[in-house]
Image (spheres, rainbow, N blue to C red):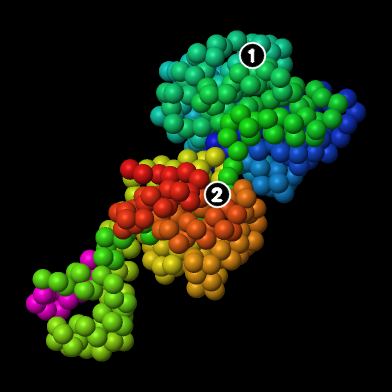
Amino acid sequence: MKVTKADLRLYAITDRQWLGGKDFYMVVEQVLKNGATFLQLREKNATHEQRVEEAKKIKQIAAKYHVPFVVNDDIWAAKEAGADGVHIGQSDMDYEQARKILGPDKIIGMTAKTVEQAVQAEKLGADYIGVGAVFHTTTKQDAKDMSRETLAAITKSVSIPIVAIGGITYDNMDSLKDTGVAGVSVISAIFAKEDEGAAAAALRKKADTLFGAARSLIFDMDGTLLDSMPYWRRLAREYATKKGAVLPPDFDEKTYTMDLNECSDYFIKELGIAGNRENMQKEVLEMIREHYKKDIRMKPGMKELIEREYQNGSRMCIFTTSEKACAKAALERLGVLSCFEKIYTVYDIGVNKRNPESYLKICEQMNFVPEDTIVYEDVLHAVESAKKAGCRVTAVYDADSAHLWEKIKQQADETICF
Ligand SMILES: Cc1ncc(COP(=O)(O)OP(=O)(O)O)c(N)n1
Ligand SMILES: Cc1ncsc1CCOP(=O)(O)O
Ligand SMILES: [Mg+2]
């Protein structure tokens, strides 16, 4: 995913004709510094050579603020300047040709004014769509006004992110809420203002409240993201069966509460399995690692939740009692590893989940404010610690903690139960 919804929250498009004598690059820097999340160089009166020069300079500024930067219309200028991509409309160069010139890694945004154009843009491979004019504008003379209904129909018809454009101001953008757009794209609402930086800051703040602010999230792994508890529960049985042991009827009941040492002793002394504690534990751990690598699944709805939060720009990390290699292998196989900034284990932190200090340490390392952080957890003692640390908690139901679910619900701020 080259462009996320969060990238499109406040999409600034340049127009230097508003700037009078002000330095173009200083203004662009102010706009980025004050919260623009995407930038387009749209200089209709510039020559190709001028655009390349401008794009080269702006590229440096945008990179400094980690903001994606595209050039309007002029694919060759984008290519020569090494911009992040282009924005093309229905009467500009066609998508396939632009993609051939720029290669697979660059951003190509497209304009759509109808559902059919949007569906076609997604089919072709566009990374996002600009839709408008959602309000009347004089900035683009040939732009036709679009109804809120058409905008909503377009956002429903595709799954790539959509940014609204045309006549958007601080005062009228409220009515774009709940249309499905990821954000707003503006020219005059920033570049025609006396203080462009202040205008960008105000628009960004409002866009965050209208289109979803990024959140700080800490996820437990086993029992919360992954349906791994049944694998742990079956592990002793799986191992003893593999070793050819005859299992007594009370095998599950007995081994369920044993730790690894007790379990190995039981295997050797009572079931006659050959080996010693150390080797057995190595073999058992190897068995569970294979499951993380190969077949443990995600709990229902969790992949969608993570992808949605990632799209929204939320910052996320994992906090687990399992081995880091297991977490990495499973999350990579399930296609969500890149959504997490970091995987912390209780061994890295040096404090277990019974101690609220563990959550405070993670918040400190991630630069999260505990009161603004949401912890996703399935076990009671961790829910209690996260609450004591001052975090909000979303409790996730897991069958292994079913007997404690009422208590968990009392502690948690929200619950997820499938
Ligand atoms: C984000 C975004 N959306 C739409 C447009 C309009 O593109 P186009 O229809 O090609 O018109 P011009 O901007 O080239 O006049 C855009 N530039 N950016
Ligand atoms: C480029 C473009 N495409 C549709 S409307 C528009 C102009 C947006 O400018 P403003 O934000 O000043 O209305
Ligand atoms: Mg164009």
Is any part of residue 99 visible from this angle? yes
Q: Amino acid at mark 1?
A: Phe
Earlier-in-chain disc, 1 versus 2: 1
Q: Residue at x 26, y 65 (%)?
A: 233
Query: Which is more toward the observer, 136 or 235?
Result: 235
Left or right, 167 with reference to 250: right
Residue that label 2 marks: 392
Q: Residue furthest left?
A: 246
Q: Secondary structure at mark 2?
A: strand
Q: Is 357 a magenta residue?
A: no
Query: Which is more toward the observer, 271 or 413?
Result: 413
Query: Which is more toward the observer, 401 or 78?
Result: 401
Left or right, 230 with reference to 9: left
Region in magenta: 234-248
**Residue 89 lies in quadrant:** top right
**In this picture, is 249 found above or below 174?**
below
Q: Residue at x 50, y 58 (%)?
A: 384
Q: Is 247 a magenta residue?
A: yes
Q: Amino acid at mark 2?
A: Arg
Residue that label 1 marks: 135
The rendered magenta stretch, by its main secondary structure, is classed as helix
Which percent across, then down, holds residue 416? Answer: 40, 44
Which percent across, then down, holds residue 348? Answer: 53, 71
Left or right, 286 with reference to 21: left
